[in-house]
Image (spheres, grey):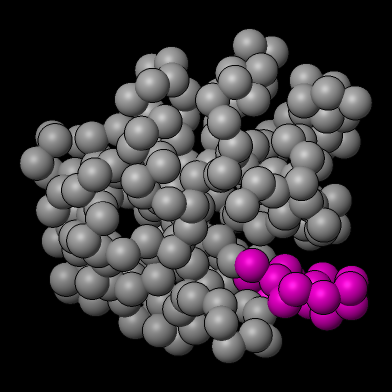
Amino acid sequence: MGIVENLQKIQNQIPPHVTLVAVSKTKPDELIMEAYSSGHRDFGENKVQDLARKAERLPGDIRWHMIGHLQSNKVKYMASFVHLVHGVDSFKLLNVINKEAAKHNRVIDCLMQVRIAREQTKFGFSRDELLEVVQSDSFGELENVRIRGVMGMATYNENSGQIREEFRHLKRIFDELRTGVFSKNKSFDQLSFGMSADYQLAVDEGSTMVRIGSLIFGARNY
């Protein structure tokens, strides 16, 4: 099947309220344009340099998602156009995004990354660390970022029971924040987890945004 058929197949399997981010990292422009021509607009990149170059070359109405681990010193290269930053894993990074957004007179949407996997390599806040940040005075002073929700990545394994429990843990944190700190913030509505291997399980557990690459574009190019 081709890219357009792959996209259609996945869209048919997820509810309309779930955003499908097509992970285009390592993929050439022509493959992205194939997906774009079918009407798809949400694309995810994990390296800021690639994101910036593609944003320059490709249509201006693409919604670019920064889905990789983001270093503070790279924020400036994408602050003028990025649609959503998926992996905010420290207050320092959030502060930098806020400052760079202000320079472009815009508000950047962000997801706070929660560490739900058992692997030590994953980034993110613990529940307690996240609560401490969003309840702090410093957080309340940030005017150029908008927290849209939380995201997380499950442990990379075949154990669907463990993955489901990690997703449920994140859902509990999301619900706690939505009814607590963000109860007056109607735009706090995104719960992002699920990738190619587990997106159907993720949607079952309440995900509103899935990041899918290989099922759309085929195996990764390195």
Please determine whether, in this image, residue 131 is positioned above or below residue 213. Answer: below
If the image is split into quadrants, where does the N terminus sit?
A: top right
| Residue at the spot 58% in from the left edge and 88% down from the top edge | 120
Is 162 covered by the magenta stretch?
A: yes
Where residue 186 sits, quadrant-wise, is: top left
Does 107 sit left or right of 193 as displayed?
A: left
Q: Which residues are magenta?
A: 153-170
Residue 202 in sight in this render: yes
Image location (x, y in percent) of residue 42: 56, 31
> In which quadrant of the rendered view does residue 159 lie?
bottom right
> Taking 143 as reference, is 95 above or below it?
below
Q: Residue furthest left?
A: 103
Residue 111, position in %: x, y? 45, 56
Residue 179 visible in the snapshot: no
Residue projecting furthest to the top = 37
* Horizontal relation, residue 61 to residue 13: left or right: left
**Compared to 40, does 44 lie above or below?**
below
Between 158 and 130, which is closer to the camera in this rendering?
158
Q: Position of residue 145 (x, y in %)?
A: 27, 50
Residue 71 figure quarter: bottom left
Q: Main secondary structure of the magenta part?
A: helix
- Image spot of residue 10 (x, y percent): 83, 34
Q: Quick check: is 2 in the magenta stretch?
A: no
